[in-house]
Amino acid sequence: WRACFELLDVSLNRWPDDGAALLARSRALARHRDGAGAVAAARAALAHAPQSEVALSQLAGAALAADDHETSLEAATKLIELNPTSVD
């Protein structure tokens, strides 16, 4: 895990607006059972791409896993507003 986070840190230090790297960091943190960190990284990705369904989905899932039900509901609601006919 350490190598994964080191590579992501290097990348994000160079390109702090890299949404894909922020989402990868969120997923890695969630897998590493750092719910607050996963939510923070997903929020950062969403800040750079507020209409991103992928970022909203990651935020909703990370927040749910971290027992942050309010954030999860907000992200899921926004996701439905953006794409009400999605089967995801």
Image (tube, rainbow, N blue to C red):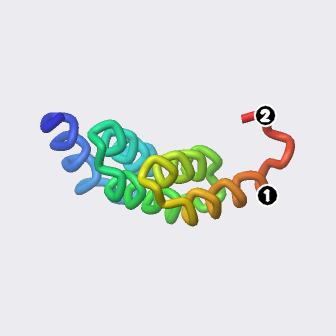
Tag 2, which secondary structure? loop
Please report the residue visible at 70 percent of the width from the left and 53 percent of the height from the top. 79
Residue 10: image x %, image y %? 19, 48
Please report the residue visible at 36 percent of the width from the left and 52 percent of the height from the top. 35
Tag 1, which secondary structure? helix
Residue where numbered disc 1 is placed: 81
Please report the residue visible at 59 percent of the width from the left and 52 percent of the height from the top. 56
Residue where numbered disc 2 is placed: 87
Query: What is the number of callouts on the image?
Result: 2
Label 1: how many residues lie within 10 Å, few (<14), some (14-19) or many (20+)?
Answer: few
Q: In this rendering, would 2 be left or right of 11?
A: left
Q: In this rendering, would 48 be left or right of 36?
A: right
Q: Quadrant of residue 27?
A: top left
Residue with the most extreme right position: 85
Residue 65: image x %, image y %? 45, 47
Give the Cα distance between marks 2 and 1. Answer: 13 Å
What's the amino acid at mark 1?
Answer: Glu
Rendered view: 11 above or below 31: below
What's the amino acid at mark 2?
Answer: Val
Residue 28: image x %, image y %? 32, 39
